[in-house]
């Protein structure tokens, strides 16, 4: 899912080590892409190390004290702990809440991206490989899905399903898989007519082998680029839905929910409750997009965006 | 040709039918709107009365048949809350949403086009890189957060712009619009800008790409060699060519913009259909939710149908590959 | 192009000019909940009532403390225990000039009692109680009989808006009131315009029988988001708002541009328990369901009450605006018991009580609550979870939108069948407004045993049951002597509170924020009325 992971897989497909070095060199030519990568890796470390790094476990109610609520950034608690980014209405340390929230946002975005990638890839490959009526039917569904804006589909689903991590991941997979399916099908159709595919068929390799051994690797560059973009946009979409009160429950505040909670305090000058999670969200999404932009330049798949 | 159109038409109808099923049954399995209306004083008999008056005591399939029966005649049931036909409520609110969406598209083109063209003409200039970075941001930034920051800065901190609502409106041909009054305009600008962010970035990219392509096109070289003034080349010949894809894409983005207005409207309390959807979800006003979703789905299906048919008329080779997003 | 521009400017000027010409006094009110209908018989929602009651009046009105005062009736009295005689105000005119008389009253009562087509929650129950029957005696006297002694006639009549027979006969409910066709009342303001989602406009009725209204025009504007509503006040879009966000209250108090008005609400915020043998949301430390229900032990209930720091909730969450209590009706209401004081915060004693009850090691519970119904409901639930966790009762929090919450708390259990509601949760936060202005309503609703047929215990979702309270409540309902009734009610309250039938937290404080040059007299029942607002001279 990360850039590094994707990069690692590509040379395996080509069966040589040199392309990786070329790739890395080309990637590093862009300063902004390098910044994006460094920032994103840092965010990953912070988010997934939050249990160790965060000064407080914001979900453990014994560690949170109502009497410390709404403290400004830099305040010190009764027990001597410093709230570097202030506290929220419940007395939760904002820094800890952001780190834990970041983790939830990344998990939701990443997991839904991966699941959508798997579903979309399988469907796309099958459509391209089988062709005919199956292909036409699948593509109609894909077209329909893509023609309705993601936010609307997600809204419908969440209104119906209710809130919860697994539900929002489901909703995000539903709104994303079609992108992957269409792209994979496009690439696979082009590959299908290549000579090596004819060779594979002549050799009577199994369907699965042809699909996953030959067609899939050639779709990989395109998929990696879409996946990065999609992870960023699903993090953003999840935040938006949570802001509207339709995403994650308050017991597992993602960044979007933290921002929404802080909205009530905007007028009273308690900016930190909303602004800091917002900045964290922004930096995360921008860094992923910077990586995605560079990957697109290098791998140069024909994206319809 | 007509066979193709007929087939697409049938497909669209089928899609609408499937969506009615999904939306209707989906919305009807959740929650129970009775207790929004019941006072604490309401005993069992009173609760049953409410259930009856809302038609909730009928089996869901019966409610669906009733609903479809009305839907065919354009009646999608009465709003639980307002007691008025749901469709009528939405149509009353729709102009506000359409105005907001339209204003944001215009804003996106007004801001995005010059920036994109500049970036296309001087791809390596620092300013151009800055523009492209900003456009990356525009794709990335969650717009609701930008909306909050705008309110914080322009309404609370500076006190320049009103934070909520639509302001004074003027009736033009029976439709209330705000952009013709100063007060209305001051209410419109922040939500429209927030909603326009994504499309502005899109326009910048399209304009830049178009610019780079067109500048090397034969007809521009030809115009240059004929000695036309650079500004004439730019504003007449080049602009005309890059506007076509931009206007096409913006037209297709219009539906998405209407849908995304749900978010913008709830931040700025803009009295449009999207705000009403969120309010309806809060009190589980099912007919209203269903009617809104159906309207938007139908809108999209129609847009797609029209686009497909137009494309197939223009280019008969296109049959199955649907239109680009 | 040029002509279009000229046309545009012409329109803008044409519209702008009259706006300048009218130097009217306009009051713009920013409200949290939008009115859903102008039909006075449509709902009982506060957001509807506060608009509609400017136009339509009731026989009996409620004063700022929700106590009955004469409205369109000047007097109501018992001629015998089962008969009430209502005298109507003379010389009252509808907004269209027609005279108001007993026929309109009979028409209004009949319409409501017959059921209003499509109305989600008409206040018809107010007429159904006590087996009321009404007849016209003469043009300005109406007689109402009941099937037994019935002390609450005045309170019930305060629910019923009077509509004009000559306008409202045969109209479509709600629709014809929202478009103005039947929106003709006797009140101080008349209907001008209703634009859903945007505004409702009223104007002064010069022929009003009572005090002349201060404002030429009144505009209600719905602004759901708390922060946005406050922003609208601060930059002058509106003159007064309801429910200013509590975190901002301390700052607003020192803001010279803004005034705050407040009054204790009749809404009690409380924790209720489930009293079943086994509760689904009570677990041991390992998350296994507990075989006994600890809430059945009064020591556990008391411990949970003592563990709550009500003052901290008041200061840190409510912006200083709540009234910690151990009563179920607010001070000043009939039935308030002055001897009951809010429990102090005492975590040590709470732990001791748990020890004595055999739960020294604590247990696990899930505390449920709504997240968009009461002032700061979700933050309060989270704070209580914090406080309970500290005395060893590990508390998870689940909050949900009000409609989902109330469905589940009342009848969410899978074993619910039609007619037998079974609640889903084990312990939850909820609220109760004593809308009738006196405690019979609340004792019966919260403390009396649940009975679906008679409607007693209709807010007692946990099924608390105490025969001593049941007897007292029953006798209070039949008692016409106020002194005796008061004693019954206060005693029932004391028994219930000593037994910790529920944990009272606080009464909400209704607050409004308005421009400093205005004066607002607040109401207990949360409604924002234009005639409560005046200019400071």
Image (tube, coloured by chain):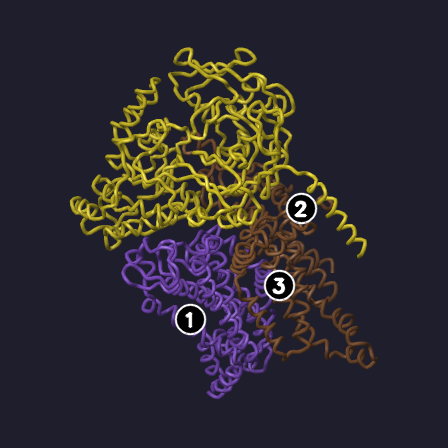
Chain colours: A purple, B brown, C yellow
Vertical placement of residue C150 versus A300, above or below: above
- Cα distance, mark 2 to mark 3? 26 Å
* Disc nearest the viewer among 2 and 3: 2
The answer to whether the residue labelled 1 contacts the one labelled 2, judged by CB atoms less than 8 Å apart, is: no
Q: Give percent across and percent down for residue C1.
A: 80, 57
The N terminus of chain A lies in which quarter of the figure? bottom left
Q: Nearer the viewer, residue B139 or B10?
A: B139
Q: Are marks 3 and 1 on the same chain?
A: no
Residue B199 marker: 3
Q: Give percent across and percent down for residue C458.
A: 37, 32
- Cα distance, mark 1 to mark 2? 47 Å
Q: Are marks 2 and 3 on the same chain?
A: yes
- Label 1 marks a residue whose chain is A
Q: Are marks 1 and 2 on the same chain?
A: no
Q: Which residue is mark 2?
A: B169
The C terminus of chain A lies in which quarter of the figure? bottom right
Packing grade of label 3 (10 A; few <14, some 14-19, many >=20) is many
Dot 3 falls on a residue whose secondary structure is helix
The answer to whether the residue labelled 3 contacts the one labelled 1, judged by CB atoms less than 8 Å apart, is: no
**Residue furthest right in the image:** B226
At 39% across and 34% down in the image, what residue appears? C266
At 35% across and 38% down in the image, what residue appears? C422
Q: Nearer the viewer, residue B64 or C310?
A: C310
Q: Which residue is mark 1?
A: A43
Quarter of the view holding residue B66: top right
Q: Is residue C63 left or right of residue B95?
A: left
Dot 2 falls on a residue whose secondary structure is loop
- Label 3 marks a residue whose chain is B
Vertical placement of residue A303 versus C339, above or below: below
- Cα distance, mark 3 to mark 1? 28 Å
């Amino acid at each position: 899912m990360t850039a590094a992971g994707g990069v690692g897989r590509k040379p395996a497909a080509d069966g040589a080590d040199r392309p990786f070095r070329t790739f890395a060199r080309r990637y590093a030519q862009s300063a902004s892409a390098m910044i994006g990568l460094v920032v994103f890796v840092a965010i990953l470390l912070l988010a997934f190390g939050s249990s160790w790094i965060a000064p407080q476990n914001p979900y453990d109610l014994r560690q949170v004290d109502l009497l410390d609520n709404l403290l400004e950034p830099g305040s010190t608690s009764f027990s001597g702990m410093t709230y570097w980014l202030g506290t929220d209405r419940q007395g939760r340390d904002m820094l800890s809440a952001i780190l834990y929230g970041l983790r939830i946002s990344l998990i939701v975005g990443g997991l839904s991206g991966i699941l959508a990638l798997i579903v979309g890839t399988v469907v796309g490959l099958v459509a391209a490989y089988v062709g005919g009526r199956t292909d036409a039917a699948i593509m109609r569904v894909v077209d329909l899905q893509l023609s309705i804006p993601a936010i609307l589909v997600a809204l419908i689903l969440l209104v119906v399903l209710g809130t919860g991590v697994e539900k929002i991941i489901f909703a995000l997979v539903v709104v994303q898989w079609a992108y992957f399916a269409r792209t994979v099908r496009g690439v696979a159709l082009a590959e299908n007519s290549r000579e090596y595919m004819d060779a594979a068929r002549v050799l009577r390799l199994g369907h699965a082998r042809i699909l996953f051994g030959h067609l899939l690797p050639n779709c990989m560059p395109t998929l990696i680029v879409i996946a990065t973009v999609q992870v960023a946009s699903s993090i953003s979409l999840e935040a938006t839905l949570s802001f509207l009160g339709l995403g994650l429950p308050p017991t597992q505040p993602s960044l979007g929910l933290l921002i929404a909670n802080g909205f009530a305090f905007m007028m009273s000058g308690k900016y930190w409750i909303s602004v800091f999670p917002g900045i964290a969200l922004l930096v995360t999404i921008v860094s992923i997009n910077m990586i995605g932009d560079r990957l697109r330049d290098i791998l140069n798949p024909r994206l319809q965006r | 040709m007509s066979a193709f159109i007929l087939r697409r038409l049938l497909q669209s109808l089928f899609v609408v039918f499937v969506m009615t099923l999904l939306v209707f049954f989906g919305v009807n399995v959740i929650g129970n709107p009775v207790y929004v209306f019941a006072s604490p004083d309401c005993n069992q008999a009173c609760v049953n009365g409410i259930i009856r008056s809302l038609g909730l005591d009928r089996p869901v399939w019966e409610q669906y048949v009733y609903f479809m029966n009305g839907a065919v005649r354009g009646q999608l049931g009465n709003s639980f809350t307002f007691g008025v036909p749901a469709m009528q409520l939405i149509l009353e609110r729709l102009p506000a949403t359409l105005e907001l969406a339209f204003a944001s598209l215009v804003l996106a083109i007004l801001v995005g086009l010059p920036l994109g063209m500049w970036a296309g003409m001087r791809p390596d200039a620092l300013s151009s890189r800055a523009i492209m970075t900003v456009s990356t941001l525009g794709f990335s930034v969650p717009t609701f957060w930008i909306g909050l920051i705008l309110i914080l800065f322009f309404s609370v901190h500076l006190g320049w712009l009103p934070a909520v609502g639509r302001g004074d409106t003027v009736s033009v041909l029976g439709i209330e619009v705000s952009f013709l009054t100063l007060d209305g305009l001051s209410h419109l600008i922040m939500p429209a800008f927030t909603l326009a962010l994504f499309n502005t970035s899109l326009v910048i990219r399209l304009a830049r790409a178009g610019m780079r392509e067109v500048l090397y096109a034969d007809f521009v070289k030809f115009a240059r060699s004929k000695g036309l003034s650079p500004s004439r080349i730019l504003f007449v010949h080049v602009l005309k060519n890059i506007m076509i894809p931009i206007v096409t894409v913006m037209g297709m983005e219009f539906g998405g913009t209407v849908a995304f207005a749900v978010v913008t409207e709830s931040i700025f309390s803009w009295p449009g259909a999207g705000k009403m959807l969120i309010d309806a979800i809060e009190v589980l006003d099912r007919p209203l939710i269903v009617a809104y979703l159906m309207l938007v789905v139908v809108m999209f299906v129609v847009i797609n149908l029209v686009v497909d048919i137009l494309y197939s008329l223009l280019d008969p080779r296109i049959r199955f590959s649907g239109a680009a997003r | 192009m040029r002509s279009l521009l000229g046309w545009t400017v012409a329109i803008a000027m044409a519209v702008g000019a009259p706006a300048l010409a009218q130097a009217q006094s306009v009051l713009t009110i920013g409200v949290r909940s939008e009115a859903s209908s102008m039909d006075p018989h449509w709902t009982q929602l506060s957001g509807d009532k506060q608009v509609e009651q400017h136009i339509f009046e009731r026989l009996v009105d409620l004063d700022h403390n929700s106590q009955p005062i004469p409205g369109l009736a000047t007097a109501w009295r018992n001629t015998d225990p089962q008969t009430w005689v209502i005298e109507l105000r003379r010389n009252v005119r509808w907004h269209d000039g027609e005279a108001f008389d007993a026929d309109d009253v009979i028409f209004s009562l009949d319409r409501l009692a017959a059921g209003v087509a499509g109305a989600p929650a008409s206040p018809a129950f107010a007429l159904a109680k006590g087996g009321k029957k009404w007849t016209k005696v003469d043009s300005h006297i109406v007689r109402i009989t009941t099937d037994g002694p019935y002390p609450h006639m005045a309170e019930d009549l305060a629910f019923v808006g009077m509509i004009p027979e000559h306008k409202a006969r045969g109209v479509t409910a709600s629709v014809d009131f929202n478009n103005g066709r039947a929106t003709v009342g006797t009140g101080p303001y008349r209907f001008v315009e209703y634009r859903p989602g945007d505004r409702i406009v009223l104007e002064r009725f010069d022929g009003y029988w009572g005090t002349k209204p201060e404002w030429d025009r009144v505009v209600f504007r719905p602004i759901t988001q708390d922060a946005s509503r406050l922003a609208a006040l601060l930059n002058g879009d509106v003159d007064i708002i309801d429910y200013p966000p509590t975190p901002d209250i301390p700052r607003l108090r020192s803001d010279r541009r803004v005034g705050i008005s407040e009054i204790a609400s009749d809404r009690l915020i409380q924790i209720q328990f489930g009293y079943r043998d086994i509760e689904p949301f009570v677990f041991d430390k390992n998350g296994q369901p507990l075989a006994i229900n600890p809430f059945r032990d009064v020591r556990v209930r008391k411990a949970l009450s003592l563990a709550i720091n009500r003052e901290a909730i008041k200061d840190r969450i409510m912006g200083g605006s709540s009234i910690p209590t151990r009563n179920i009706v607010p001070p000043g209401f009939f039935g308030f018991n002055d001897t009951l004081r809010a429990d102090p915060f005492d975590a040590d004693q709470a732990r001791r009580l748990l020890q004595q009850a055999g739960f020294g090691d604590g247990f696990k519970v899930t505390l449920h609550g709504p997240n968009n119904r009461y002032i700061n409901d979700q933050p309060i639930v989270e704070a209580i979870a914090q406080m309970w966790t500290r005395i060893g009762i590990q508390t998870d929090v689940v909050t949900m939108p009000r409609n989902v919450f109330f469905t589940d708390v009342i009848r969410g259990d899978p074993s619910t069948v039609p007619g037998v509601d079974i609640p889903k949760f084990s312990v939850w936060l909820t609220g109760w407004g004593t809308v009738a202005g006196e405690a019979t309503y609340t004792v019966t609703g919260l403390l009396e045993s649940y009975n679906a047929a008679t409607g007693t215990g209709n807010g007692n979702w946990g099924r608390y049951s105490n025969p001593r309270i049941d007897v007292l409540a029953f006798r209070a309902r039949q008692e016409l002597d106020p002194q005796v009734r008061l004693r019954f009610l206060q005693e029932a309250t004391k028994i219930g509170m000593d037994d910790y039938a529920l944990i009272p937290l606080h009464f909400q404080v209704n607050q409004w924020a308005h421009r400093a040059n205005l004066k607002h007299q607040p109401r207990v029942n949360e409604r924002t009325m234009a005639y409560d607002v005046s200019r400071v001279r």
